[in-house]
Image: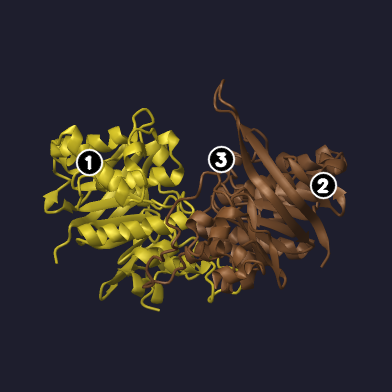
């Protein structure tokens, strides 16, 4: 099966006063139609920048480079602004973490939802309205017709997030990129929203790139996982495989940090990762995790080799454990 | 076990203005809570946003007086105890280590401030105690003259913990202490909190929406819904077999890192009700799978079930038959 989205050697460099910040370093992955890829990592690992780079929404100071950046056979890296603008919102759309800042406070939600549809589909206001009401119903918002006239601030956080999801679905996109879509929500609402995304994926065959720091979300929703650290993908694997046999020391350390009923005993000490993520300004050499890694030695100062066992890959001087 | 703090029939209302001419509406943020905090325990408080857990925390800290009912510490009403005496014994750790530290003060003086407020020793003594405490929470003395802006989120949370502990309080009220932190930092802070509890014999009130964390650290758990405690039980018990339908749904929503299990359907359907317009009877009845007519008519009182307490008609002898 050919991939819907193919990213190879993606880098994002940001000019900062102290030099160049290498926010995303040589990241590659692909997503197939109807599948879910999770990008997982802690703050500052470059996962959000990767998402923005895919969508062509990077801040002005950032420079994007890629050997290959292809969506449905279209070369996004070489495409002009017009092509990307036509794709974004229609065929690939994004759900942001904080709906309060992503929604425009001075327009009603109906206005914002209908605009996307009319811009891309050339639909009439009535058609767009009908579509908006239909989708708000899909995301579980009661009395959707009345909601269209409301402003973002009149809705609760959970409702705003659902509106964001409905808005992303307006044009029936082939790909949705969701950046921490449920992080700000209660667990009860989180479960409902993820369930909804899964249902919609089954129904419309969307591909989903979900960015999260929550290993629970990853385990339950992803088909494949890419673990990011300091701007690079350090390990990628099918979800079951990653949780059963994590190879990279960072992935393993991360998994030991979370309490898991049945595996960790209440009150027992949890694993932790000492130190901080390295500054990515200037030239970054060798394994970026080596300062915090319990297994590190002198050989880690060299660029880590990439291992590939089946479709499970990782970048570390150590082989399989 | 001895009761350290007692919360009896506590309510807290907020009056919300709806403009110049509209009548103000009343929000019952905390709507009748009875709790005892035993010495040495870790009482976890869980519930969705808007359930009143932070309001309860602020009342336990004496930052907000109850509208009704009373909170006592060793039998003395918090109002009678006075802010200073209370602050020496009950201290907070808040969620946001960015907002809770004064950005213009150096770390050592932030941590020493409670000592200064209580007129303890001279400046040199206070600085020494502050630095000792900073080292105890894992911040080397070289950070003493840094500003909060120079520290990472985890380091700032360590400063907040050092400030809370410098007076050697008995109770620490932690309101989402790790929610703003990365997983690898969260585990460090949880480990630290558990170590400090041992070392200083602390009692914690631990508020979190992360149920896996609560299961890990708490000894007892209170589940709150719409300003009330709907279930209170030992941690192992509640996570193994929750009694209240809301506790069951809440626990069913937890995504443990077990691949292949899929996303659970908690059956809650509707969103959290408007706290300004709570449903009549049991607050949970519109979302409850087991609701009966009685649930819409009267609010359930808490009934004891062993050492646990549950506020659900299905457990009340009077109504139990209706649920069979």
- Residue drawn at point x = 73 percent, y = 48 percent: B10
Question: Marks 1 and 2, Cα distance to the nearest angstrom?
Answer: 61 Å
Residue B192, relative to residue A161: is it above or below? below
Classify residue B261 by image quadrant. bottom left
Q: With B162 as the anchor, is B211 left or right in this view?
A: left
Chain identifier of the residue bearing label 1 in the image: A
Residue A7, relative to residue B79: is it above or below? below
- Residue B84 percent across, percent down from the top left: 83, 41
- What label sits on residue A226 in the rendered view? none
Tell me if label 3 and label 1 are in contact, CB under 8 Å: no
Q: Which residue is mark 1?
A: A130
Along the line of sight, which residue is nearer the eye, A169 or B195? A169
Tell me if label 1 and label 2 are in contact, CB under 8 Å: no
| Quadrant location of the N terminus of chain A in the rendered image | bottom left
Residue at the bottom extreme?
A: A321
Q: Is residue B300 visible?
A: yes
- What label sits on residue B276 in the rendered view? 3
What chain is colored yellow?
A
Q: Which numbered disc flags the more N-terminal residue, 3 or 2?
A: 2
Q: Mark 3 vs mark 2: tell me if same chain.
A: yes
- What label sits on residue B88 in the rendered view? 2
What sort of colour scheme is used for the picture? by chain
- Residue B148 percent across, percent down from the top left: 61, 40
Q: Residues within 10 Å of mark 3 (few under 14, many from 20)?
A: some
Along the line of sight, which residue is nearer the eye, B201 or B8? B8
Q: With B98 as the anchor, is B1 left or right in this view?
A: right
User: For the residue labelled by badge 3, is the local secondary structure a helix, a strand or a loop?
Assistant: loop
Q: Mark 1 vs mark 2: tell me if same chain.
A: no
């Amino acid at each position: 099966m050919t991939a819907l989205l193919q990213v190879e050697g993606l880098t994002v460099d940001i000019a900062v006063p102290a030099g160049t910040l290498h926010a995303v370093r040589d990241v590659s992955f692909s997503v197939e139609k109807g599948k879910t890829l999770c990008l997982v990592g802690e703050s500052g690992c470059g996962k959000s920048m990767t998402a923005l780079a895919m969508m062509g929404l990077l801040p002005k100071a950032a420079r994007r480079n890629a050997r290959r950046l292809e969506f449905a056979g279209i070369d996004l890296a070489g495409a002009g602004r017009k092509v990307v603008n036509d794709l974004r919102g229609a065929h690939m759309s994004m759900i942001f973490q904080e709906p309060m800042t992503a929604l425009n406070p001075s327009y009603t939600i109906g206005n914002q939802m209908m605009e996307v549809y009319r811009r891309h589909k050339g639909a009439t206001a009535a058609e767009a309205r009908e579509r908006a009401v239909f989708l708000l119903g899909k995301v579980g918002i009661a009395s959707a017709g009345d909601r269209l006239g409301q402003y973002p601030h009149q809705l609760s956080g959970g409702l705003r997030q659902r509106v964001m999801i409905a808005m992303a679905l307006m044009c029936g996109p082939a790909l949705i990129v969701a950046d921490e879509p449920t992080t700000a929500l209660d667990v009860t609402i989180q479960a409902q929203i993820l369930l909804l995304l899964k249902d919609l994926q089954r129904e419309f065959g969307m591909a989903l790139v979900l960015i999260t720091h929550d290993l629970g979300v990853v385990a339950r929703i992803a088909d494949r996982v890419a673990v990011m650290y300091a701007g690079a993908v350090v390990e990628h694997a099918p979800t079951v495989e990653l949780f059963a046999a994590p190879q990279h020391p960072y992935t393993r350390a991360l998994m030991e940090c979370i309490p898991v009923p049945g595996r960790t005993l209440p009150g027992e000490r949890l694993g932790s990762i000492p130190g901080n993520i390295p500054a990515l300004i200037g030239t970054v050499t060798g394994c970026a995790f080596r300062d915090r890694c319990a297994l590190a030695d002198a050989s880690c100062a060299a660029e880590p080799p990439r291992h590939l066992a089946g479709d499970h890959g990782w970048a570390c001087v150590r082989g399989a454990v | 076990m001895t009761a350290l703090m007692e919360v009896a029939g506590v309510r807290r209302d907020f009056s919300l203005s709806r403009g110049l001419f509209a009548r103000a509406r009343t929000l019952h943020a905390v709507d009748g809570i009875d709790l005892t905090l035993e010495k040495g325990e870790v009482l976890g408080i869980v519930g969705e946003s808007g359930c009143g857990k932070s309001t309860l925390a602020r009342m336990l800290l004496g930052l907000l007086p109850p509208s009704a009912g009373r909170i006592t510490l060793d039998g003395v009403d918090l109002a009678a105890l006075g802010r200073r005496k209370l602050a020496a014994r009950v201290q907070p750790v808040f969620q946001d280590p960015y907002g809770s530290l004064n950005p213009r003060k150096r770390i050592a003086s932030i941590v020493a401030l409670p000592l200064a407020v209580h007129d303890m020793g001279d400046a040199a003594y206070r600085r020494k105690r502050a630095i000792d405490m900073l080292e105890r929470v894992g911040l080397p003395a070289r950070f003493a003259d840094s500003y909060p802006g120079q520290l990472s989120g985890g380091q700032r949370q360590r400063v907040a913990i050092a400030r809370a502990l410098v007076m050697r309080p008995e109770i620490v009220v932690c309101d989402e202490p790790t929610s703003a932190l990365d997983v690898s930092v969260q585990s460090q802070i949880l480990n630290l909190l558990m170590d400090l509890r041992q070392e200083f014999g602390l009692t914690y009130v631990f508020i979190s929406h992360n149920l896996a964390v609560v299961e890990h650290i708490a000894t007892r758990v209170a589940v709150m819904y719409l300003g009330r405690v709907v279930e209170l039980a030992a941690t192992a018990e509640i996570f193994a077999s929750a009694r209240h339908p809301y506790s069951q749904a809440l626990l069913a929503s937890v995504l443990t890192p077990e691949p292949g299990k899929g996303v659970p359907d908690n059956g809650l359907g509707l969103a959290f009700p408007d706290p300004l317009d709570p449903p009549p009877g049991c607050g949970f009845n519109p979302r409850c799978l087991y609701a009966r007519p009685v649930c819409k008519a009267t609010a359930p009182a808490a009934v004891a079930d062993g050492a646990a307490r549950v506020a659900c008609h299905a457990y009340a002898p009077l109504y139990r038959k209706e649920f069979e």
